[in-house]
Amino acid sequence: MWLVEMRVVYFFINFLSAMKIPQDTSLMNVYVGAYTNTGGPGLTHFNMDPVNGSLQVKAQYWVKETGENPTYLTTSNNKRYLYACGENNIGTISTFEIDSATKSLKPLNVFNIGISQAVYIQSTLDGQFLAIAHYSGHISIVATRNGIPERVVDRADFQGGSYGIPSRQEGPHVHSVLFSKDNQYLYAADLGNDKIYIFKFNLTNGKLSSPFSVDTGRGSGPRHLTINREGNRMYLVNELSNTLVSYDVNQQTGSLSQRSSISTLNDMANLGRQTAAAIRLSPNQDIVYISNRGIESDIVSYKINPQNPQNEFQLMERVTTKVDNSGFPRDFNLIGDYIIVGNQNEHNLITFRMAKDGFITRQSVLGNIKSPVSIISV
């Protein structure tokens, strides 16, 4: 009897081993913005296989629908609309409606802001306003109606230039904007003046207060900001000095207090030959990822130790994004179990598999993607 039972158990184990356990194969949706002046589409919709991270083009949108050079993408908080800001002479916002079932995009309109070089865009939680950073030295606030940009309701104009690096800092260059978690404050990183400007934001009419600022250090070139889920910690990547900086956020006053700073370079001899670009937090908020463009061209990851504010970042790894000799990872994003990287100068997308501990391994390369510079998922 015992032998019969063991044979049954053995048969059952082998049966289960031979079975193919069904996996979640529902495709994910990835959207990539690009420079149109290199001859490609401004926006491409990809399906991503969550099992192996492979990307397949689903749809492409050209300059008539995207405006020229839609170099940064975002969505409304309710995921009904996708917005792309245009780095061009008039500054544009192209709006797409996102199908709730298929995630396909329906072009709605291209709105002319009237302020050149729109390079970053953020939506308020309620979707009533869009904040846009203009590399030409401005911020614009655009009101929406039914998700569609309708009119500019406020703007901030900056002067000066720190001349820390004269060829890049001869004037104001606002590179990004970021709302506080409650939308009470708007932060703006001005690469040209080495400052983070902080505005009180009026949620009723979209007006900005007179700002105060935080100095990031001469020649640092602040580029992009991100904030943790709780809204009490902010992280900055400085493009020109290649540094990662953390700040405590006073959620009552909006003020910032610096905690830690670390170089993102592998070799300090490469300072001036490399520029930092994008910054992302891991889903658990315990790892920060940075992309470096130039001679190193890599993704760098740091473990965050919030208990040690003077030495908060512990280097995990550096992983090259180069396929040939150029790389230049302008943007990347964490999507499911993967990191998708856009190499602007190599015209490709690289998929890295992200392990549970945050370390990454190259999975695949998709070539002939013209100048990818912004990556998001819905």
Image (tube, rainbow, N blue to C red):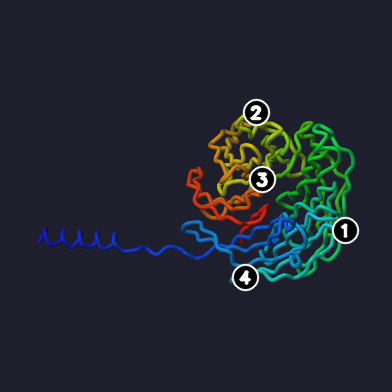
Instruction: Residue at 53% x, 37% y: name it.
Output: 317
- Total tally of numbered discs in the picture: 4
Q: Is residue 52 above or below residue 175?
A: below
Read off the residue under disc 1: 114
User: Residue 55 at what x, y percent from top left?
Assistant: 54, 60
User: Residue 151 at what x, y percent from top left?
Assistant: 86, 63
Q: Reading the chain from its start, which is encountered first: label 4 or label 2?
A: 4
- From this viewpoint, which residue is outermost toward the left? 1
Read off the residue under disc 2: 268
Q: Is residue 148 above or below residue 91?
A: below
Q: Is residue 124 visible?
A: no
Mark 1 in CB contact with mark 2 (< 8 angstroms): no
Marks 1 and 2, how far apart at CA:
41 Å
Read off the residue under disc 4: 100
Q: Say what amino acid the circle numbered 2 marks.
A: Met
Instruction: Residue at 76% x, 48% y: name it.
Output: 176
Q: Reading the chain from its start, which is encountered first: label 3 or label 4?
A: 4
The quarter of the displayed image where residue 234 is located: top right
Instruction: Residue at 62% x, 57% y: name it.
Output: 369
Mark 3 in CB contact with mark 1 (< 8 angstroms): no
Q: Say what amino acid the circle numbered 4 marks.
A: Ser
**Circle 2 Cα neighbour tier, 10 Å, few/some/many (<14 / 14–19 / ≥20):** few
Read off the residue under disc 3: 278
Mark 3 in CB contact with mark 4 (< 8 angstroms): no
Mark 4 in CB contact with mark 2 (< 8 angstroms): no
Q: Reading the chain from its start, which is encountered first: label 4 or label 1?
A: 4
Marks 4 and 1, how far apart at CA:
32 Å
